[in-house]
Structure formats: structure tokens, C-alpha cells
Amino acid sequence: MAIIGLINHGPSGLSQTAERDAQCAFDEFSRHDLQGLGNLQGQFLVAVSDSANHRLILYPDPSGLRTAYYHQNDETVRFSTNLGTLAEALAGDIEINEAHENFFLSHGFFPFNGTMFDRIQLIPPQHALIVDQDGLRLQKIVKANAQPPTNDLNHDVNSMDEDAIIEYIDQAFQKAITDQLSPDKKVGVLLGGFDSALVAAYLAKAGKEVHTYSFYYEDSRYNQAHTDTVADHIGSTHHWIPVNAKTIADGIRTFDRYFNSPTNWLNYVIQTEAVCRMIREDGIRHVYSGDGCDAAFLGYPRVHTTSVLFNRLGRWPKGLVHFLTRVLDSAVLENTVGRSYTVLLHLIRTLGRDMPERGFLTFRIFDGNSVRHLKAPNYQSAETSDEALLTRIAAPLKGKSPDRIAYGGKGFLSPNRSKMIGSSDSTGVVIQAPYLNPDFKSLATSLPDELCRPKGSSDAKETGKYILMRMAEKKGYLPREAIYQKKFAAVDAPVDKWLKCDFRDEGMQFLKDLPFPPNQNFCEALFEEKLIEKLHRKFVASDSITTHGLSLLLTYSRFTRFLHQ
């Protein structure tokens, strides 16, 4: 048996040694076989060579905080925790996933646990890959001796007052922190806004020496507010880590070495890796983040706003939608207005859909027209349309509230897991995310929407997360100004200038490494600064970024460059 990553040992937190984690995994497997592996929680990948039963078992943690990829050709199965490594090892024996590439360029992810490479698949969370004499199969893993849920809040929330709910959430979050608690005295926190500040407060309460880290930009408009306020209140030490154009350029060049997925938020992923390097140099092994809070407690103000808008607007006839998208199908128009073109077309297409497809993906990177412009004159449509794929992907969310549908879709696009895994692999620190603790996440997502976004006026009306913020205020974990601060997009940075100006020449060369010949005029337009995009950043966008499409293409090219070598 081999294991990478860390196992959470319940009340005793994280282990001091890898040997203890390995022994724990071995004991569970010996007692309960595959179901024993289901008892494990943490961030890990377990590989078992079971000679007695002539099988190989690969099991990533059920939360998906460790990933593994596999490829089968004839009777040979190859696997790796790093997608780029596996793809290069298979050079000459793999092809691009053309069936879903157009969808990926529009929406930023490959559906159905696929990747950009045909026949390289992701092992989905809560599943094990088993290779035996009968071949290869995926098997869902459940806990051995699983207990029925005992979460009273799930059943009696309507009969509980706000104070009782706050007490329950406080206890549940303390347990989530304890389950992931480092044995080291000194720990780090990736400090953004309220979410991560609350994590830092709980760690300080647990007796840890807390060091917080934030991105530092020369343009102070992008720097996180209230870092000193938090430090003074909980007794932590804050560190500013400089981020600039060179940081981003270096990260793009080596992007596929650590990260497993292209992203339209490349700066956020790269910057986190750079900060984790500094944390490791400071002698800290375990770092904590606020990842998962917005999705669980209905944060992300723009996701909520867009969800409400899409739910209220009437449904347009498909004929009208088709007519408008055809009229606006102009490469010249797109090259002139840039990001606003995609946003407009996304709104039009959405209004021709029913729920849950309508509210599922509130954000789009390239429009379908854009993909055709990008690939012209060699564009080929996929056998299955984007609309048909969208219907299949969104189907499990049918019947959910509009907000839960929108936040479910947000999870497909989010770079958080790729960021956490890649930064850990690159630097050797392990990023823990208490909001993603399975028990706490289950509790949070079971709350009525009204507890996260009350219909009346409240201090959390814009940000969401009402009940969590009320808990932090009532318990005194953070000062009021740090709790109800204006939501600051974690991805926000002057990345448009860095890519369009500082990285233009090298970026144009990188786009030649895409698996298709991109249209030259389209590529050049991506690097041009446009007046209408400045207005879009100021009045429309939830962040200051209009280079989502360019970021996706640059990171995609890093994974496919070896195909040209």
C-alpha cells in the first residue's frame, strides 16, 4: 500500500508522521476492504496492490481534494496524480478530446470526469478505480458501518431560533477545525476576506500561532482590506507577499507541471502557489484557507444576482434566440468589443432555456460563436451540441432552488481544488479547507436559503452567508468591520495589463501550441486593450478581469504543447 497526502484523525487532528497515516489506511482496508477506505477522511490518494485478490486499487479522498487520472490501452493501465505527466508519458498514444473541446472552450471544464485528452479520465470523488482479471472498473465506495445521519439541524431548523442555530453551527465548525488541526504550533492561513479570517480566528482560539498571508500589489486598489484589523483582534502575524507580472509569467510557463486543469483565473492559481512557497520557507507545513464557504453559504454576490435575474426574466422563444445569435455572429464585432460580446450572447442564450439549465451556468468564458471565430476557417462542430451536454450535466439539480442550482454550476468552473492540489504538490505544504469538511459542508448546504440570504434587509444582504456572519459577530470571533466588509473577489488583480502588455509577445507564441491552429486575427484581438472593456470592468464585471478567454487558452496550451514536439 502507498499513500500520498494526509488523513484527518478525528479529534486528534492531523498526524505527526506519514507512517501513522499509512498504518491507519492499512488497518481500515484490512478490516473492511474497500468500505474501510471509505472511512478515511482528509486529502490523500491510496494505492493498494492486493496480490491475494489479484487487483490494483486506486482511491482518492471522497472530497476530491486529491485527484488521480488513468488511461487504459489494450491490457495496460497507467495512472498519475498529475495530468500533464501522464499525458507526456503517453505522447504518441493519445489524442485531444475533440468531442468536448468546444464545450470546454465555452464553459471552462470538461464534463463527465473527462480531460482534454481522449481516454484520460479523472477518478471521480467517492469512487475507487479497480483493475483486476476482469478488467478496469469504477466502484462507488461507502463507509463501513455507516451510521444514519444524526444532524438535528437538518430536521428541526424551522423550530429552532437563531441563537440555537448559531450554537449548533459554532460547534460544528469547531469540530471541522479540530479534525484538520495541525500538530505544529505554527500554522498559516491564506487570508482573503471574512471566510478565511474566521478560520484564522478559530485556529487562534485552538492555541495555534497563526500567520496570515495575502497578495500584495503595487496598485493598492487590489490589496485585501482589514488584514491589520484581523491581526490585532486574534493576535496573528500578517505577511504581504508581492505579486507582479513576473510572478504570473513564470507561473504560466510551468503551469502544467503542478496544476491539473486549465483555468480562466490563471493569476489566482499561480499567485497561491507563489504564496505557499513563501509559507514553506517560513517553516510552516500546514496552511488553511476559506475555500468552500461561498458555495456552501450562498456567497458570491454576482452568482446570486445573476441567478435572481435569470429566474425572473421570461423565457424567449428558441426561434428568437437563434435569430439574435445568428445576427450577432460577427468576428469583427467580437474582436472590437471583446468580453462584452460573450456576456451579451450568454444572456440571450440563457433566456431561451428552462430550469435547471437556465440557472446552472451563470458565467461563460467564450460564446459558441467565439469558438467558431477562434478556430476559423477549420472549425468543426461537435457531434453533441453544447445545449444537449448542458441538459445532461444540470439534470441532477432539477428541483433545487435557483441559488442552489447556480452555486452547483459554479463548482464545475471553480479553480479552487486545482489551486489547492497544485500548490501543495509544488511547495510541500498541505492546504486544509475546513468549510470542505464533509460533515460541515453537508450541514451548511442543508440550511434553508433564507438563513444564508434572508429576504429582508440585513448586513449580509449583499454578501450572503448571513447566519455564519451572525455567529462570528455574536461569538466575538472577529470585529464587525471585518465580518461585514465589502466582498472582494479573490481572483481580482491587474492581470489584464500583465497579459495584454507585459506578456503579449510570449503569449502569442504560446497560443501556437494549442491543439488546433487558432485564427491569427482573433488571437491578436485578445491582446488588444479596448475602450468598451474598460467600461465593462467598471460597470458590469464582478471583478476587474476581461481576459478570461485569453487565460484559458494560455493555460490550455501548456498541456498540449508536447503534441507539437
Image (cartoon, rainbow, N blue to C red):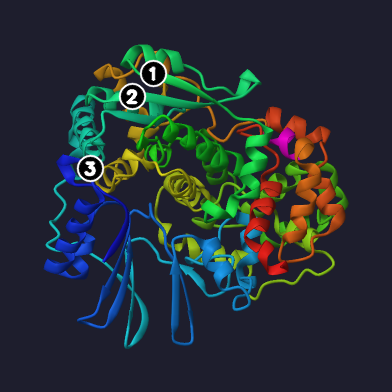
Near-viewer residue (28 or 233): 28
Q: Which mark is residue 16?
A: 3
Q: Is residue 146 above or below residue 526?
A: below
Q: Give the main secondary structure, helix, strand or loop, of the magenta stretch.
A: helix
**Mark 1: secondary structure:** strand
Residue at the spot of label 2:
210
Q: CA distance from mark 1 to mark 3?
A: 24 Å
At a point 80% along the width and 35% down the height, the residue shown is 532
Residue 520 lies in quadrant: bottom right
Q: Is 185 placed left or right of 222 in the picture? A: left
Residue type, numbered disc 1: Thr
Q: Secondary structure at mark 2?
A: strand
Q: Nearer the viewer, residue 195 or 408?
A: 195
CB within 8 Å, label 1 to label 2: yes
Residue 441 in the image, given as x and y percentages of width and height: 31, 44
Res 269 quadrant in image? top right
Q: Residues within 10 Å of mark 3 (few under 14, many from 20)?
A: few
Checking the image for residue 237, the label placed there is 1
Badge 2: few (under 14), some or many (20 or more) residues near its Cα, within 10 Å? many
Q: Residue at x 79, y 42 (%)?
A: 504
